Amino acid sequence: MEAVFISGFARSGTSMIYRTLALHRDLWYVKGVPETFAFSRLKDSSQQLSYSQRQYLGGSADRFREIVEEVSKEPEPHPTLAQCYFYAASERHPDEERLLEKTPSHIFKADQIFTQFPKSKMVICARDPLDMVASYRKRLEAERALGKPEPEISWLDLNLDEMIEKFQSTTKRIDDVLERYPDRTLLVAYEWLTAKPESNIQRIYRFLGLDPEGHNEQPLEKLKPDKADKLHDSPITQNASEVDKYLSADEIAKVEQETQRTRELYLSGFYEG
């Protein structure tokens, strides 16, 4: 199965890229379920799948489990759970060959992805670490205002040191993936994507070998509404930096000092076009 995976540490950016590519006639996606976590959260075929994971399979995990049972009888090595999962989903798209999927954390599963889907490619979106901190804080503030339970938004509730550590570990991983899979990965800078969307999308098309005339050939159903961050269901949109609003001068200096490589990586994803 051919596949396009979108990953990285710019959540709004990955969503914008996903939303744009989902309009292309040569890619299939599952409406309303952009993130599957198939490589990180599928541990056993008998586990209780999340609501979104079941929706990806058409509302039921029965066919997925049937496929796992069927292939378990075949000679080893058996297809992995992720391969069975996406194959089960693909049965609902018999005339389409190329899958589109977005899970930001799948950057940490790139080795499995490229091994299990040898025809796949990955678009990685990076963002200025200062803007990332501001984005997390803004999103956390919005989620709390909406009354979301704290356990559901704990992934946003990180102190500055935890954020910096997250940037450092993700940067290290992206560096490794770009070096090991140069022909199968493309790095895109969030700010340049939103400032120059047309040239950057054309660049992504060329990387993926997509027909540039295939854009907007199929309608895109609205993604799951996100009241806290409307950019997650928006076309590529430029938004103003809010760093000064959410970080103090001392915090800005600390982030700049301790995430130099992250910023270098992010800058390397700029494309003038």
Image: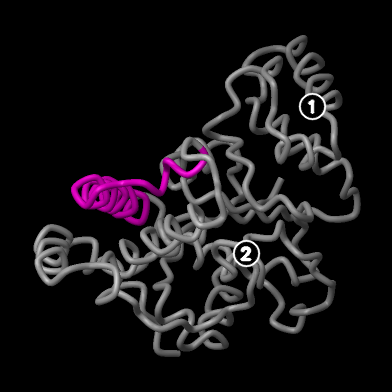
Residue marked by disc 2: 18
Q: Quadrant of residue 23?
A: bottom right
Q: Residue furthest top?
A: 73
Which quadrant is home to the C terminus? Answer: bottom left
Q: Nearer the viewer, residue 30 or 143?
A: 143
| Dominant secondary structure (helix, strand or loop) of the stretch shown in magenta | helix
Residue in the image at 77% along x and 37% along y:
87
Q: Is residue 199 left or right of residue 97?
A: left
- Where is mark 1, residue-wise? 64
Q: Amino acid at mark 1?
A: Phe
Give the image location of residue 152, x and y in percent.
52, 40
Range covered by the magenta-colored residues: 152-179
Left or right of residue 266, residue 222 in this image:
right
Q: Nearer the viewer, residue 147 or 104?
A: 147
Q: Position of residue 230 (x, y in %)?
A: 59, 69
Instruction: Report the quarter where the N terminus lies.
Output: top right
Relative to 92, residue 220 above or below: below
Look at the picture and state if 135 lies above or below 57: below
